Image: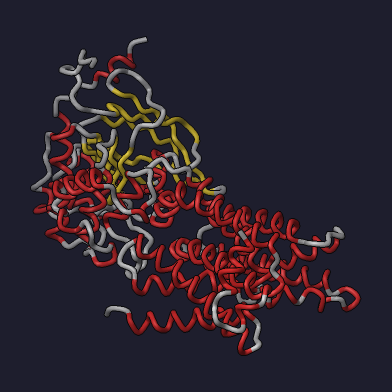
Amino acid sequence: MMSFWQQMIGLLPFEWAKFAFMQNALLAALLASLLLGVLGTMVISRQMAFFSDAIGHAALTGVAIGALLGLGDPLWAMLVFSALLALSFSFLRQRTKASSDTVIGLIMSFAVALGIVILSRRGGFNRYSQYLIGDILSVGPADIVKLLVLLLAVAGFWFFYFNQIMLLSLSPSLAKSRRVNTGLAEAAFSVMTALVVTVAIQWVGLLVINALLILPAASARNLAGNMRQYLWLSAGFGLAAALTGLIASYYWATASGATMVLTAMGFYLLTLVLRKK
Amino acid sequence: MNDTGQTATPSCGSCCTKLVRVGVKLGNNPVLEDINLHLHCGQLTAIVGPNGAGKSTLLRTILGEVPHSGHVHFLDSGKKRPDKPFIGYVPQRLEFDPSAPLTVADLFGASLQKRPAWMGLAKDQRKIVGEALNAAGAGHLLDSKLGQLSGGELQRVMLALALTPLPDLLLLDEPVSGVDMAGVDAFYEMVSQLRKRYHLSIILVTHDLAAVAGFADRMIFLNKKIIAQGSPAQVLGHPLVQQIFGRLKPELKQGVPEAAESVPHHCIACELEAKP
């Protein structure tokens, strides 16, 4: 399947399309942006933008834990740490309504600081700076398989849990009256978001990952008239931002993740102009 | 089809809802204490009280959302105890911003269908939803965004949603906040009709005693504990209620049915329950 994709892209009459690393990066960027764009719709509806930002930043502690454990690839440590953090945040959100922003902010600061302290021992932080800005050009076939697995998981989740999460976002009591297991739905959505953000971080970079989660959905909100349009437009804006951003970063020789965020921002501004008054 | 007993028991679902010594604490602060209630089908019970009296918490306790002490029982007319009756609930407000791409059809889709709301309403569901909205005078709103509805329109939509499918118990939490005066009376009139048509058990929470007094069969004045209960006239005349809310103007009291308590009531489930 990978070779088919590479042949397809290789046929394009562009310089960048001839390189295997760009072919892989493009596929990864499209898959990751699709995942982020889809989940972003409910992250905004649930008013969880700060939550997802915190999860992204706190992934640094996951990297540090992986390094302490001597793991070559800290991804598993990051995933476990993010999932646990997401569960504790969702517990906090349900228990303490008003002050959860403060608590999330505190935990995020702590996690980032702890990560930096551990990773910077003996001046070794530079090795980990790829997590800050991401490196999508290093994506290999194994990474793409991971993304495909996540895409399947999110698609299934979005099919069976979307209604519950939507009701939950409107009113937990209304969701309860509709027999939604509110605690489970909330926790499952938090963990799902945390996993996607964490996997995408190594390619997009934890400094800007949240933008790719929020911007496509925010753009879609400006134009969509119902849930169906909201979801498809958000996915579409995510894909478009990833495609244009990655290609632009090739010609400008800039960091891909951040460039994708700039193009996503461009799309957002465009939708602001197009928005019906 | 098993039709036996259908004539004796009209279309009432949860014939009684019983709360026995229910208490709720938030940390160390009691929010509700020693609540004993017995609600019957075909009755509109208004729960009134000042802000922070625990009215919404009481509804959320009945919904099973809040950890509590004591017991909440639901009994249907066959003396069975359905653990989870179907509860229609109209929330005080919804959390969405006015630009949210969320239509009335999306809301019904998410509530009624297995398939996700982003796939839209199925054709047969669209018909059911259309009828439900029509009954609440909101048939034209099916494809409107929630953010574009007026307060009154949104409440009619939420009422239609709470009644689809027909619940065993209907809970309304401050259903008329953000609705103008004329809308309030129209809304209460509609709720009042429902009780008769479907023999529903309805609990309505409000801090506006006067507006609801003419429509309720029973009134419960709540301020962490049950301060007074009985007919609206009895509750409005209670000295502690008058102390908190001030004496209601005489013209408001004119609409209050004095004899509400004497409405003949026949609850099979309770009678069966009473026998050992």
The answer to whether residue A49 of the structure is visible from this angle is: yes
Location of residue B263 by image quarter: top left
**Which quarter of the rendered picture does the N terminus of chain A lie within?**
bottom right
Left or right: B135 as drawn, with respect to B125: left
Looking at this view, name the residue that lies furthest to the right: A122
Residue at the far top: name it.
B276
Depth check, front residue: A36 or A5:
A5
Quadrant including the C terminus of chain A: bottom left
Residue at horizontal 62 percent and vertical 90 percent from the top: A252
Residue in the foreground of this view, choosing between B164 and B117: B117
Q: Residue at x 40, y 47 (%)?
A: A175
Across and down, in percent, residue A120 comes to 84, 75
Q: Position of residue B261 (x, y in %)?
A: 17, 31
Q: Within the image, what quadrant is residue A68 found in?
A: bottom right
When the figure is inspected, residue A187 is found, relative to residue B42, above or below; the finding is below
From what the image shows, is residue A198 above or below residue A168? below
